[in-house]
Amino acid sequence: MPELVFFSGTMDCGKSTLALQIEHNRSARGLVGMIFTRDDRAGEGKLSSRLGLVTDAVEVEDGQDLYASIVEHLSQGGRADYVIADEAQFLAPEQIDQLARVVDDLDVDVYAFGITTDFRSKLFPGSQRLVELADRIEVLQVEALCWCGARATHNARTIGGVMVVEGAQVVVGDVNHSAGEVGYEVLCRRHHRRRMTAASARAAALSPDVLPVSPA
Ligand SMILES: [Zn+2]
């Protein structure tokens, strides 16, 4: 039975690397996939991983009907033995419904990869719809670690190194950002709640004002 699978996790947990691995394994078996992405760090029409691998992809536009796009591709003689949707948190809920229809009506596996929650620890609408519709959810356990060493489960947004909890849901930034820019950092829930990034923890450790530390 074809499936809609949601591979979810924090930033930096290896989602895109796994997407590229799935693509590689299937194309090595002679299968041809259709790859969608949106706002990949490598630029438009690219699916890339932090490990430096990259492949071409279809950049999803606002309002694009993904089901219709695949049907059109097939009607022009193209193949879509499976579908990969990376950065699926940036898709609209209707586009997730269209992907579910691809599974049900075209009998094609769809593998969606996305971050579950945003920097405020709220579900992205696309990820919420995936949780609602997916046949299977795989939570990626590649060890993204908080600065304290605990497993990172939350995404923090920083501006000039200071964690913020208000602002637009989608702002382009990266975990490798320069000082003063919008950046992202993965944290454990405890440090996300306390708004303690690696930089603020370092500053607190150096400041005599905050000692003695109250017991956790
Ligand atoms: Zn932590």
Image (cartoon, rainbow, N blue to C red):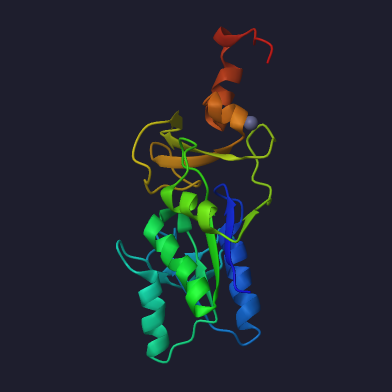
* Residue 165 % position (x, y): 42, 31
Residue drawn at x 37%, y 46% as measured from the top left: 170
Residue 122 to residue 22: above or below = above
Residue drawn at x 52%, y 52% as measured from the top left: 132
Residue found farthest to the bottom: 77
> Which residue occupies the foreground of this view, 109 or 195?
109
Question: Is residue 47 visible in this depiction of the protein?
Answer: yes
Residue drawn at x 38%, y 49% as measured from the top left: 172
Q: Which quadrant would the C terminus be assigned to in this image?
A: top right
* Residue 46 % position (x, y): 44, 68
Residue 85 to residue 168: above or below = below
> Which residue occupies the foreground of this view, 33 or 127?
127
* Residue 55 % position (x, y): 50, 73
Q: Which quadrant would the N terminus be assigned to in this image?
A: bottom right
Give the image quadrant in which the ligand numbered 1 is located: top right
Residue found farthest to the left: 63
51 displayed left or right of 59: right
* Residue 191 % position (x, y): 59, 28
